[in-house]
Amino acid sequence: MIRFIVADLKRLWAGSLVIVLLVACAAALGIAVTLQERALRLGSARAADAFDLVVAAPGSETQIVLASVFLQPSALPLVSGSVLHTLSQDPRVAWAAPVGFGDFYGQIPIVGTTSDLVLQGGKKTLTDGRMFSKRTEAVIGAKVEMALGDIVTPMHGLAHEGGHVHADATYTVVGRAAETGSPWDKAILVPIEGVWHVHGMEGAHGLNLDPHHGEQNETVSIGEPWTADTPGVPAIIVKPKSIGDAYRLRQEYRTASTTAIFPAEVLTRLYATLGDARALLSAVAIGSQILVGAAIALVAVIHVGQKRSQIAALRAFGAPRTSLFIIVWSQLLILTTLGAALGMGLGYAIARLISHLLKAESGVTMPVAFIGSDMRMVIGLIVAASLLALGPAALACRQSVAGALRR
């Protein structure tokens, strides 16, 4: 019987191919939506793992997280340098690293910070070179296509937005950071003192920084203790010593002049919005599957109609109705299963492609992988198709033998 079923499918390959492709398209849409939504959540959550607490000036929490964690261009108000000084002296804080941005090298963001953030307080090491030790030195992210010794000339803002070059300021690349799977892999990291100097912010660490005469002070040490006169910064990344300390610090720095944010909480709210979008796309996928189901039923009826003479001949030679029913139903089930398998592969490929494009744009690594629950949709599609195939199979067994042979 199996050999007969396979031979029959080969003979009517055109109709069989249509059924397989219809099922594949329906399965691929649902699989791609599910895999990509999960990849986006996992990737963004992992990218924010290193950012326990962000302290900034009052404003949109989403904007603060997108700017400080995901390095999206944004004009954030500065939080006072005295806040950085206070946090750095707080016994509940393992380290507090300022983040200053706004400059670019081409399309690559230049971020001012400290070695604590780059090396996560000593938990990470560079993959090449050394850490910056002067305000004219830089460490590049793992995915930045530059080499040690390259010279970086910063531009304030992006070129296509009217940015201007800081012609008398440069950074020399001296190291490469380890990969993090975040937008920081595609950034150039420089000492925060260098950013202050380039922008002429006087009084950093008590220094008189003249942006037009950087050469005379370029060897001044960095990482000096912060003072109450430290210049302001867009955000401060804080590493609390414990979970309890993190919650207490967040409460204390939610004031009229500062705001404290857990990036994970902000992402959770974004995921809720993303979940609504996924629900909409899932509804579209279900609707398409219903339409595909109707199309499969139509194609299956036509498929059976093409074999009326063959079925009638088998009946005339004594083939039982049960065997004919099994043959027709099995053929449709085989086609549906092949389509579902093809759809899983196609959906996975689409999700991988989207993740690759998003990573190239944002720098966030988005892991695309199947989990057990993903099989439910595919199994459901196969079960629905097998039930749908009962109609054409029953129709094939009920047709008149004499009428079919006369045709």
Image (cartoon, helix red, strand yellow):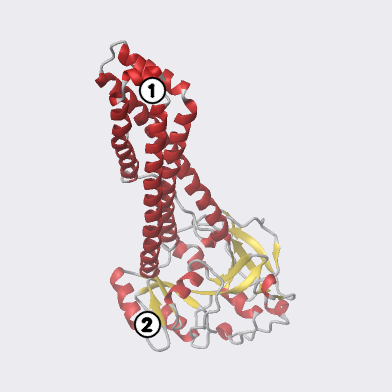
- State the image coordinates of residue 47 (x, y, percent, origin top left): 45, 60
Q: Nearer the viewer, mark 2 or mark 1?
A: 1
Question: What's the residue type where badge 1 is placed?
Answer: Arg
Q: Residue 228 appears at what percent x and percent y?
A: 48, 88
Q: Is residue 401 visible?
A: yes
Between 130 and 153, the residue placed more toward the observer is 153
Binning the other alpha carbons within 10 Å of mark 1 as few (below 14), some (14 to 19) or many (20 upward) gives: many
Up/down of 365 relative to 239, above or below: above
Q: Residue at x 41, y 32 (%)?
A: 302
Q: Nearer the viewer, residue 260 or 384?
A: 384
Residue identifier under label 1 = 308
Report the residue at 46% width, 53% height from top: 366
Q: Are marks 2 and 1 in contact (CB under 8 Å)?
A: no
Which quarter of the image is occupied by the N terminus? top left
Which residue, given by chain and number where applicable, does mark 2 sit on? Answer: 253
Secondary structure at badge 2 equals loop
Real-space CA distance between mark 2 and mark 1, rounded to the nearest whole angstrom: 79 Å
Q: Secondary structure at mark 1?
A: helix
Residue 174, how many percent across, how many down? 63, 61
Location of residue 319 (image quadrant): top left
Give the amino acid type for the residue marked by disc 2 in the picture. Answer: Tyr
The one of 257 and 174 positioned closer to us in this rendering? 257
Q: Give left or right: position of 206 versus 147.
A: left
